[in-house]
Amino acid sequence: MKLITKEVESLLLANPLYSTDGKRTAPVLVKFFFGLVDLGTPEFVELGYFTLSELTSVVKFGKPTIERDKFYSGGYGVDKSERTVMKLATN
């Protein structure tokens, strides 16, 4: 499966790195399934930046451990102060 499609690439280009600095919310542009677990406590949840090469470098049993959610259609954001995901208002 291709991780970055043309559609995802245009979303990333329209929302450059650091473009949400100083803002309370950040849009969730793409959703990846990755071999990590959110333990439900704030001290174990991390929001940050990563490179595609960092994600694809994690291999288990000779296969990448990441997959893009091909059914994710957007409309969600992350409240950076509360570390929660919420549905974004549509105009």
Image (cartoon, rainbow, N blue to C red):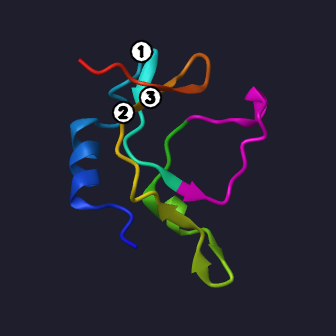
Q: In front here: 24 or 87?
A: 87
| Principal secondary structure, stretch drawn in magenta | loop
2 or 1: mark nearer the eye? 2
| Residue 89 position within the rendered picture, expressed as x and y whole percent measured from the top left | 35, 19
* Relative height, residue 2 to residue 18 (above, below): below
Q: Compared to 53, does 73 lie above or below?
A: above
Which residues lie in the magenta part? 33-47
Magenta-colored stretch includes residue 30 = no
* Residue highlighted by disc 3: 77
Q: Secondary structure at mark 2?
A: loop
Residue type at mark 3: give it: Gly
Say whether marks 2 and 3 touch (CB < 8 Å). no
Q: In terms of depth relative to the viewer, which is nearer, 29 or 62?
A: 29
Q: Residue at x 76, y 36 (%)?
A: 44
Q: Residue at x 29, y 52 (%)?
A: 8
On the rendered image, what quadrant is the C terminus found in?
A: top left
Helix, strand, or loop for circle 3? Answer: strand
The residue beneath circle 2 is: 75
Q: Which residue is mark 1?
A: 22
* Closer to the camera in the image, 77 or 61: 77
Q: Seen in the image, is 64 located left or right of residue 4?
A: right
CB-based contact (under 8 Å), mark 3 and mark 1: no
Q: Where is residue 71 shown, x and y percent of the image?
A: 40, 55
Which image quarter holds the N terminus? bottom left
Q: CA separation, marks 2 and 1?
A: 20 Å
Instruction: Give the left or right position of residue 91, taking residue 4 as reference.
Output: left
Horizontal side, residue 39 vs residue 59: left or right:
right
> Which amino acid, mark 1?
Gly
- Which amino acid is tagged 2? Gly
Q: Tell me the residue at 36%/40% (across/down).
A: 74
Which residue occupies 37% across, 30% down? 18
Q: CA distance from mark 2 to mark 3?
A: 7 Å
